[in-house]
């Protein structure tokens, strides 16, 4: 298979064209992933409505019945439920890290074993997040361990 990448001017609309004999399961999965990532997320902060890119989100967490997007240095509120966000991110770098959190594996700087079979992750922004032991295998798979 041949891959061609062409840079265009900022005035032109970006597009992705796939030419294939048939659509395999893996290709369909990647296309859905790109469509999901392109759509973005709606979030709220200080009475304002914001559009967030999936790549900006470090993790999604539910605390006391309220949902939040945690980014590099800001926290946004969301109206999504945890299971809705998890379904939306099904074929991406996000994974369930605990009963109340979905974590972006692409934002993990390093991991270290913690007590009781849990793992502690340090994110690129320096924040520490604990992955519950029941989700450690998912973390290892996402990190290629």
Image: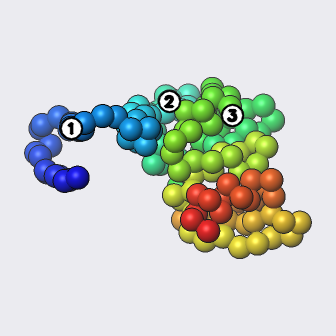
Considering every residue shown, the one lying at the far front of the view is 21
Residue to which mark 3 is pinned: 82
> Which of the 4 image quadrants contains residue 79?
top right
Residue at 86 percent of width and 70 percent of height? 115
In the rendered structure, which disc, 2 or 1, sits on the residue that comes first in sequence?
1
Residue at 11 percent of width and 46 percent of height? 8
Residues 54 and 91: in front is 91
Residue to which mark 1 is pinned: 19
Mark 3 lies on a secondary structure that is: helix
Mark 2 lies on a secondary structure that is: strand
Q: CA distance from mark 1 to mark 3?
A: 36 Å
> Which of the 4 image quadrants contains residue 86?
top right
> Looking at the image, is mark 2 or mark 1 nearer the viewer?
1
Residues 54 and 23: in front is 23
Residue to which mark 2 is pinned: 42
Q: Is residue 140 above or below residue 51?
A: below
Q: Is residue 83 above or below residue 142?
A: above
In the rendered structure, which disc, 2 or 3, sits on the residue that comes first in sequence?
2
Q: Residues within 10 Å of mark 2 (few under 14, many from 20)?
A: some
Visible in this render: residue 73? no
> Whole-percent x and y of residue 78?
61, 31
Q: Residues within 10 Å of mark 3 (few under 14, many from 20)?
A: many
Colour style of the rendered protein structure: rainbow
């Amino acid at each position: 298979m041949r891959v061609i990448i062409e840079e265009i001017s900022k005035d032109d609309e970006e597009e992705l064209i796939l030419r294939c004999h048939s659509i395999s399961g893996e290709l369909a999965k990647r296309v859905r992933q790109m469509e999901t990532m392109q759509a973005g997320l709606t979030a709220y902060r200080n009475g304002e409505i914001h559009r967030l890119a999936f790549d900006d989100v470090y993790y999604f967490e539910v605390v006391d019945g309220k949902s939040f997007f945690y980014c590099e240095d800001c926290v946004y509120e969301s109206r999504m439920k945890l299971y809705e966000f998890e379904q939306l991110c099904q074929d991406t770098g996000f994974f369930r890290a605990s009963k109340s959190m979905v974590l972006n594996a692409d934002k993990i700087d390093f991991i270290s074993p913690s007590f009781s079979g849990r793992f502690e992750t340090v994110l690129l922004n320096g924040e520490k997040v604990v992955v519950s032991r029941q989700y450690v295998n998912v973390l290892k798979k996402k990190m290629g361990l």
